Image: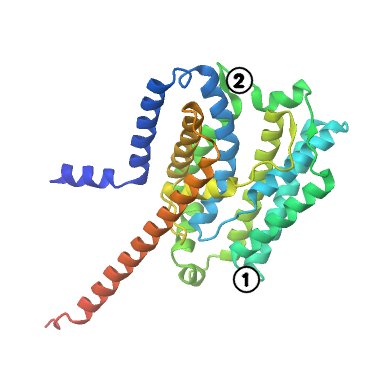
Amino acid sequence: MKKKSFLSSLVQQPEFILIVLILVICVYLSNYNEGFMTATNWKSMSRGFTIEAFVLIGMTFLLITGVFDISVASVMAFAGYVFTSFAKDGMSLFLAFLLAVLVGGLIGLINGLIVTKLEVNPFITTLATMTIVRSLVLAISQGNPVRMVDQAFTSISSSTIGGVPIIFIVFVILAVVIDIMLRKVRWFRQLYFIGGNQVSAELTGINVDKIRVILYITIGALAAVAGCLSSSRLGGSIPTAYAGLEMQLLLACVIGGCSLNGGSGTMLGAVLGLAFLSLLDNGMVMMGIDIYWFDGILGVFLIAVVLINTFSASSVERQQRKAREQGRHLPAQG
């Protein structure tokens, strides 16, 4: 009985379902196209995946607390432009990288203060920031890419250890540590409390506004890191790049177990969600399917996931209401 209950519980976990789907896709694509399992393809996929996954960390934190940020793609483009431009003008790579990360963190700070202190809806706030930052980088660059083919610049994202990209190794270690901290460390556990019931969290003494501002700064800085790494990978900055990435990251988090209402989600689930979408993207290329369909598929997935979240929340609410009603009608004891 216990074994059956464990298996039933396991099958219902988003992480388990995603692992099964990922394995199915890998088996199918390896049989469909022999190029799928080559080292070159996996190395390229791991670099692209890692760059997006750094932003995923910040998005997971925010969603757990019940908010989100859709300005990350614009921040990536702007930070990448700052990094490439200053590096090309002679600034050391370290200082240019640090400057870009500070710019990303500053944008995150602005988002956080508007959401918490002015109490503006996160969607409206980050939509406005997304538009402003994208317009700014396009106006400064006039929409022209900035090329930088210096070996030191490109090696930031291309360096490997045993054939495995260093940035991928760094991310895996970071993701494992964060997943454990979300499960075990008190400061990170309170993020779930905030997302589950903000009022109760505030009544227990948790400074919700301060934590959310910190998380917005974090995702802004991580988006800047991703923008710098992407510029290194592409050999320059492309001001029009990454459009739509924010939706992909949101979807990866949600299909990995995060709720748009907050209070749930794991780092493992979010990473598996992004891995699934990355494999889907790569598989479409391998199968010769027009890549422009990918955004449409993401939209369908997003609608489906939102509907599932809505119905699940309604079901839980009905069950809680029923339990309260049953409790009121219990006969008095003694």
Q: In which quarter of the image is residue 16?
A: top left
**What amino acid does circle 2 point to?**
Thr
Q: Are marks 1 and 2 in contact (CB under 8 Å)?
A: no
Residue located at (59% from left, 62% from top)? 123
User: Can you see residue 37?
Assistant: yes
**What amino acid does circle 1 point to?**
Glu
Q: In this view, does 86 lie to the left or right of 322?
A: right
Badge 2 density bin: few <14, some 14–19, many ≥20, Cα 10 Å: some
| Horizontal and vertical percent position of residue 331 | 13, 82
Residue 277 vertical position relative to residue 104 in the rendered view, above or below: above
| Horizontal and vertical percent position of residue 293 | 51, 41
Which label is found at residue 160? 2
Residue located at (18% from left, 82% from top)? 329
Q: Is mark 2 on a helix, strand or loop?
A: strand
| Horizontal and vertical percent position of residue 33 | 44, 21
Q: Is mark 1 on a helix, strand or loop?
A: loop
Question: Which one is earlier in the sequence, the residue at label 1 or at label 2?
Answer: 1
